[in-house]
Image (tube, rainbow, N blue to C red):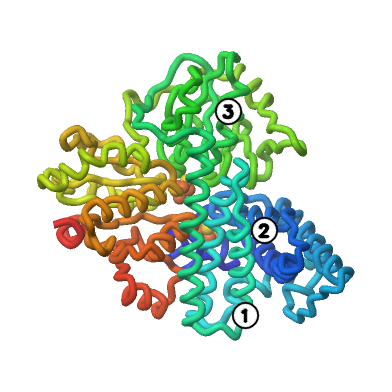
Amino acid sequence: MFCYQCQEAAKGTGCTVRGVCGKTEDVSNFQDLLIYVLKGISIYNLKAKEVSLYNEKADKFIMEGLFSTITNANFNDEFFVGRIRVGLQLRNEIRDELQKTGNAVESNVDAAVWFGDTVKEFEDKAREVGILSTENEDVRSLRELITYGIKGMAAYAKHAFVLDYKDKDIFEFMQKALIATLDDSLTADELVALTMETGKYGVNVMALLDSANTTTYGNPEITKVSIGVRNNPGILVSGHDLKDFEELLKQTEGTGVDVYTHSEMLPANYYPAFKKYNHFVGNYGNAWWQQDKEFELFNGPILMTTNCLVPPKDSYKDRVFTTGVVGFKGLKHIEAEEGKAKDFSEIIELAKKSQAPTEIEKGEIVGGFAHNAVLSLADKVVDAVKSGAIKKFVVMAGCDGRVKGRSYYTDFANELPQDSVILTAGCAKYRYNKLELGDIGGIPRVLDAGQCNDSYSLAVIALKLKEVFGLEDINELPIAYNIAWYEQKAVIVLLALLYLGVKNIHLGPTLPAFLSPNVAKVLVENFGIGGITNVQDDIKKMVL
Ligand code: SF4
Ligand code: SF3
């Protein structure tokens, strides 16, 4: 195996024996092979689109396939073997359909023609098609940067898809990008251009999801979220899928079972559509990597709707349920029957027999500062900037992770001058969202827009401020970017920001292992991307 797609890649270079995340060698290899199979499907499916044989089944399969390989989503080898088999069949179906209709694609690309059926054949093939099969390290770096970008894009596309928001162009782009990663004729410059195009579709997919979420559930509102517990048994919901969350809320209504959010589900508390449920209590715990302790103490069942799942401990394993693309051998998986809602009754029955959660915190946190809420405060914000009460906004969005060095972000937030405001989204916020940082004339010093995909809101806010202040360039705004990354959704967020022209983004706690020195140089020279050093120096550089 070789995997370097996340920030915790072993030794800062790549996991080669077993993932730091817990991913086993066979799962990692099968994930590589699944991506390879998706490339083969894409070759035929794009042609099918040209001749009006485009098939939503393939779009969905490719989107889910990409999403399932994201860090901490699916650890189940059998899942990937199954998907590889179905994928090969699907590819051949589309190929045959094209042939039948006189539109045959004559491709000698291996991904378009290779076929296997047994696990052994899959294992052998997987070893040939991994990341290291691209020898040139710069080409490999760009191919993987694009691949991780579209993995993040697929995750967001899927959340929009379940709410019936789809964009054919986004599907088509993902497939075009997959094919491009096989094309040896592309120059480094062309791959850089494709990387930027990935950012463009990153903006599109986040806009699509924003519209799906706000149209379906209303605009997030500024909200005080309880972080304590009640005495009823509860269900804890983690991940990013709001549709699953809604369904669970509906099915638990009147059962005497409370519902809490965990990690990236916290922003569900900000949506008007969910506030009407009295048994929706608030948020329990912190970012994903603390789940081994927090799930233990929660006492009731836990539903993982997306990443980030940590391989569960035996002590609470029988209370963890997965759904969607999440998977782990031995955990119960809930899937909807065709045309029906997911049935969460098994989780609810288990909850009824569980003890109430053990209290780990008390009090409230405030969030819900997505674009609509912040723009309704625009006058106040603009006045505060004009009067000098707010001197700087610091975007600290992104991911959290388990490495010790991430305490940097807590220290950074604490040490920031009092006249600066943090704009955040994603689970990165847990490093500072419970600090007493106060407010500036009623504007809290930490404004949480929501999940990592709601980083889109931060871009909308920045563009609006640019307009209000009559600036030419988004980089003239008093905004610094100190972004924490971990997995591939942060990659698409980063590419989206680059596409929007944001410069001088600091990325930490370490730069991605998949950036070769030359590719890193391109990002530094064209976009001023940099790493982080220490809190004092970075505050001087970014804020003062
Ligand atoms: Fe290693 Fe991260 Fe890949 Fe897991 S996802 S195997 S931790 S690089
Ligand atoms: Fe967090 Fe996994 Fe990325 Fe959605 S839950 S931000 S790490």
Q: Is residue 345 above or below residue 371?
A: above
Taking the spot 60% from the left edge, 23% from the top edge, the residue there is 250
Q: Residue furthest right?
A: 100
Amino acid type, callout 1:
Asp
Marker disc for residue 83: none
Q: Nearer the viewer, mark 2 or mark 3?
A: 2
**Which residue was labeled with disc 2?**
62
SS for callout 2? helix
Judging depth in this view, the residue of 153 and 84 nearest the camera is: 153
Residue 284 in percent (x, y) is at 43, 30
Judge left or right: residue 520 versus residue 77. Answer: left
Q: CA distance from mark 1 to mark 3?
A: 46 Å
SS for callout 1? loop
SS for callout 3? loop
Comes first in the chain, label 1 or label 2 = 2
**Which residue was labeled with disc 1?**
183
Judging depth in this view, the residue of 370 and 280 nearest the camera is: 370
Q: Nearer the viewer, mark 1 or mark 3?
A: 1
Amino acid type, callout 2:
Ile
Where the C terminus falls, by quadrant?
A: bottom left
Taking the spot 41% from the left edge, 51% from the top edge, the residue there is 456
